[in-house]
Amino acid sequence: MISGTTDALIATLKIGKYPASIAVNPVTNTVYVANILSSTISVINGATNAVRERAVAAYPYKLLVNPATNRIYFLRQLGSSVDVLDGTTLGLTYVPAGMFPDALAVDTLRNKIYAADFTGNQILIIDGLTNTTVSVKGVLNPTAIDVNALTNEFYAINFHDRTLISFSGIPAALPYTLLEQIGQ
């Protein structure tokens, strides 16, 4: 860990095997690391540098934090769910997410989590309160996704035809409005 003030090394911490992704909850001052080969999430107290390992299903590799709800969302290699870790209890929930979710984004204002399902050609929108999903189909091989909570739009990269797709309106259910497909 490196100090943001002095750029000095603060600590070197031992975590799981083959760390692949990191996310920070600034509200709780907790750092999370997905460790692929040890199938764990390292939970690091930012104040004390104490490390706890939380065993999870095989091969966690991408994660993000919703600091508004203290939930950590992560994907697993070859998995078909978005796994949800409660930041307080470290309890796990599994949300079905198509065939091969490969990217995540979070809208902290609306408590929505977006999963790009590469093989299923869809974007799954997860309600962070109920873990129910809505699918936006027809996005060929989405490989990346992000959301602009202030404008209520989300964006996906369409790998198949090399385009960026933007969607307007993030209500609890469909329909979504395709704003623009850039790059064709």
Image (spheres, helix red, strand yellow):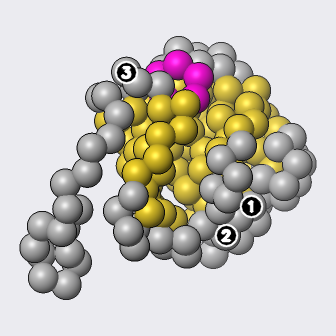
Q: Which residue is drawn at 22% across and 78% down?
A: 4
Counting from the top left corner in percent of width and height, residue 47 is at 40, 73
User: Label 2 belongs to which residue?
Assistant: 68
Q: Which of 55 and 80 is in front in this view?
A: 55
Q: Which of marks 1 and 2 is in front?
A: 2
User: Label 1 belongs to which residue?
Assistant: 111
Specify whether 182 is left or right of 171. left
User: Label 3 belongs to which residue?
Assistant: 37
Counting from the top left corner in percent of width and height, residue 73 is at 60, 45
Identify residue type, mark 3. Answer: Leu
Identify residue type, mark 1. Answer: Asn
- Marks 2 and 3: CB-CB under 8 Å? no
SS at badge 3:
loop
Relative vertical location of residue 62 with respect to residue 113 in this rendering, above or below: above
- Quarter of the image for residue 5 reads bottom left
Specify whether 106 is left or right of 77. right
Q: Which residue is drawn at 12% across and 67% down?
A: 9
* Part of the protein shown in magenta: 56-60
Identify residue type, mark 2. Answer: Ala
